[in-house]
Image (spheres, helix red, strand yellow):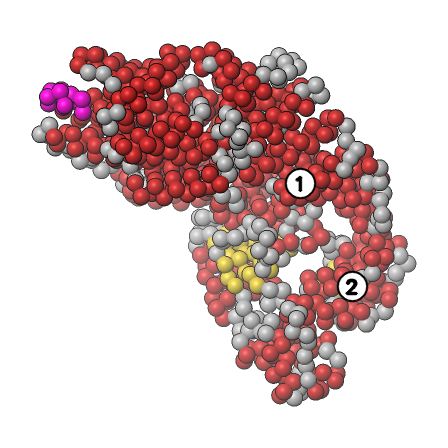
Amino acid sequence: MFVGRRAEHAALGDLLARAEGGDSGVLLVRGEAGIGKTTVLQHARDAAVAAGFRVEDAVGVEAEAEFAFAGLHQLCTPVLERAGVLPEPQQAALGVAFGMREGAAPDRFLVGLAVLNLLAEVAEDGPLLCVVDDAQWLDQASAQVLAFVARRVVAERMALVFALRDLDDAVTDPFDGLPELRLGGLGESDARALLAAALRVPLDDVVRDRIVVEARGNPLALLELPRGAPPPQLAGGFELPDALSVPHRIEDAFRRRSGSLPAETQLLLVVAAAEPTGDVALLWRAAAQLGIGREAAAPAEAAGLVEIDTRVRFRHPLVRSAVYRAATPPDRRRAHRALATATDPQVDPDRRAWHRAQAVLGTDEEAAAELERSADRARARGGLAAAAAFLQQAVELTPEPAHRTRRALEAAHAKHEAGAPEAALELLAVAAAGPLDALQGARLELLRAQIAFHTTRGAMVPGMLLDAAKTLAPLDPALARETYLHALDAAIITGGLGDGRGMIEVAEAARAAPAPPGSPGPADLLLDGLVTTYTQGYAAGVPELRRALEAFCADDLPAEPAGDGDTRRWLWLASRTALMLLDDELLYVLAHRNVRLAREAGALAMLPAALLFLSAVSVLTGEPARATELIAEETAIKQVTGSVSLRFGRLVLAAWRGHSSETVEIHAAAVQEATARGNAAEVALAQHALAVLHNGLGNYAAALGAAERACESLDPPHISLALPELIEAASRAEQPERAAVMLEQLDLRARASGTPWALGLAARSQALLSTGPTAEDHYREAIELLRACRMAVYLARTHLVYGEWLRREGRRQAARQQLRTAYELLSGMGAEAFAERAARELRATGEHPRSRTAQPSDALTAQELTIARLVATGATSREVGAQLFLSPRTIEAHLRSIFRKLGITSRRQLRDLRFP
């Protein structure tokens, strides 16, 4: 009965109209239990069918939350025959997730891309409506994938409508931020109309008014509370305790109604409530185990609590919860035991294991072992949360302490991988109760450190990792080396051990790492090189580090995740190490490789950080538009994964662009957060960005202060870039003595590195502190060296400082040439503050700089520019969509906008254009 929902009716009509016209729409229908969400969804279904839509459904069930991809499988099963058109990686991800094929556990968001493209393919045949009721009870994997899809539909003939109850504030809502329709209670006149239509008996006005007040406009309450009230209440008054919310009152009404049924009927309802799939055949097999005949269903159906035909359907989800909660513990166990016996172990072993576990009173090793096998299957499908839940339950059922300890440790690992650190720490406390062997104890401490690293990035983490690595060394040499490398990585990020000890102390401890158990891989070489660098000096470490980085560039580097020992996960550290070496070629290759491999694997947990690092590299190579695209892509991924977007990329870009207020705002927030965590390295990175900003603006005293703070607390790799900023600021602030010490450090590094980038920065810095012909020789040397490297911003800035020096030497003509080159380069790179600095100097020579010529591509958005670049390389819409996590139809829609803005009509013309 669709009473009093005119605005909701209009919103749904608009959503369907837009979808039919090729403008995808998403709507969340929120509200308390019984408020009418399911009725609104049914109205949407009816309207969609009348308009010629195909409609596909899924329903979240509270008891299904431990079965990975269960809700998604409901939605996609009717359309899986279309999966053959998907690219093979997406087909494989979907097949493994649904248990239809073997393979490595897929990244959750690669599954999301597969579902997006699958639904988009179906929508090509006609408009599609996907309806998901009780979305708050979807399993975590399904909820995250569907939230991903909802955020990426743009131009498909598709509408998605989700209904979900209001969640507790502590619960992470993957749908948060999507367009929302909040259902409130019915108005008084609509409530009276619904009540009159439902009861069909005369009511005293006082009684009717009291019912309307107590129901608070909740439609289900208006229908069910009077029905469950004793006759005296309807005759002379109607009141329930105000302490209960309306949904609880409704649930109590359902509980009272079911409690009045015959005992056999009540037990049958408990069996039905305990089995969330609604499988009628399974229900009757389980009932037979309990000696319950089919006639026992009649009283429940007559009471309007349940319908049993081709499926088992409760009147409302609150009926299911009311029946299950009201049952005695022995009756619940009897119901689950019957369902376990009735479930085919070959067809559905996981559900059988789950029911068997619920039937246990106390402990049961066989049931725990079944749950452990279910966890293995869930993990293989990529269901980390489901695997963690199975293992956690297995721990509770395990009688033998040693087995319980092992399972608790495994469950803690699974909870950590699933993003539930608090639950992981609780399970670690169970494991710590023992008994633990030496290796288990070491792995427990390692996991505790890993959780601390991911949740705090705090200064105490490197020490925790070092302790774990030391314990692991005689027990598991390979894992010990991995842990030592993690400790070094954490120390680089946090700035040391947090007690005044820095990278040297961490590296000294890491010298105790055992030798590799086999032939050293790239990560082994990187560990050894970093230890040498921090214990024997930069020059001694460079050759070893370069060999390690070249190994990371090898074509046979593993391209798929393989757990903690995966070489690919260290590409992030390898890229930063290339920055420490000022090796622009290795930096460029590794940064791009990190992004490419993360994209190919669909590893959205790793991709955002890789994108931001590449964005910073793109700033240095003079490609601000590319950097902007990468930051936009990182932001989009963070939106669909629900993670917090990182500040680093935006801070670097804003600083180099000379956007003062934006840089200062981001810098302040970054410093505040990093200081609260005791993270000196992040503070220093922010100070380096501030130094760049102030050098561009010509605020040299401020730049010097920021650069000195960066160099004071910053160990490599980032000091290699902070030193040139400090030297320029000090020279311009007329404090050359403060720059001279830093020049010695930079010169030592440059000679050890030997790259054109490093030598060019050293020559440029030497020129800033020199006079006369010596200075000019260094400027010219720096320009020649920097022309041979990829880091174009430093070449442009060298032309700038050379031109400034020439003007002060009174050589206006020569100065104009250098300043004109600097202005043109810096303007083209979007380095606005540095370009304005060049313009001021150029005007001082008597020449007015030419304004930058507008380009057709300036009209494109960041996302359109990304798509245009990719299509210009010859990539198909499907290939571009796979990279940007969009459907091919959405790419086509963007292309139409791009063609219109650029005044072209074909992809071939796009290939002929040049993009910044």
Q: Residue at x 46, y 21 (%)?
A: 577
Q: Quadrant of residue 334?
A: bottom right
Quadrant in which the C terminus is drawn? top left
Magenta range is 803-815
Label 2 vs label 1, nearer the camera: 1
Residue 33 image-quadrant placement: bottom right
| SS class, disc 1 | helix
Q: Picture coordinates of residue 5 (x, y %)?
A: 52, 70
Point 53% across, 57% down: residue? 28
Residue kind at label 2, given as amino acid type: Ala
* Image coordinates for residue 56, horizontal then vertical, percent: 60, 53
Place residue 190 in its image quadrant: bottom right
Q: Is residue 454 above or below residue 230?
A: above
Disc 2/disc 1 C-alpha distance (Å): 33 Å
For residue 751, say whether it is visible. Answer: yes
* Residue on which the image places disc 1: 425
Q: Which residue does the numbered mark 2 point to in the structure image? A: 326
Instruction: Of the two numbered discs 2 and 1 on the same chain, state the one appearing first in sequence.
Output: 2
Q: Is residue 26 above or below residue 759?
A: below
Q: Residue at x 85, y 47 (%)?
A: 362
**Of the residues shown, which amino acid type is indicated by label 1?**
Leu
Q: Is residue 810 magenta?
A: yes
In the drawing, what numbered circle is on residue 794? none
- 180 vs 843, left or right, is right
Q: What secondary structure do most residues of the magenta stretch adopt?
A: helix
Q: Position of residue 761 (x, y in %)?
A: 31, 19
**Dot 2: what SS?**
helix
Viewport quadrant of the N terminus: bottom right
Front residue of 149 and 798: 798
Q: Is residue 355 covered in magenta?
A: no
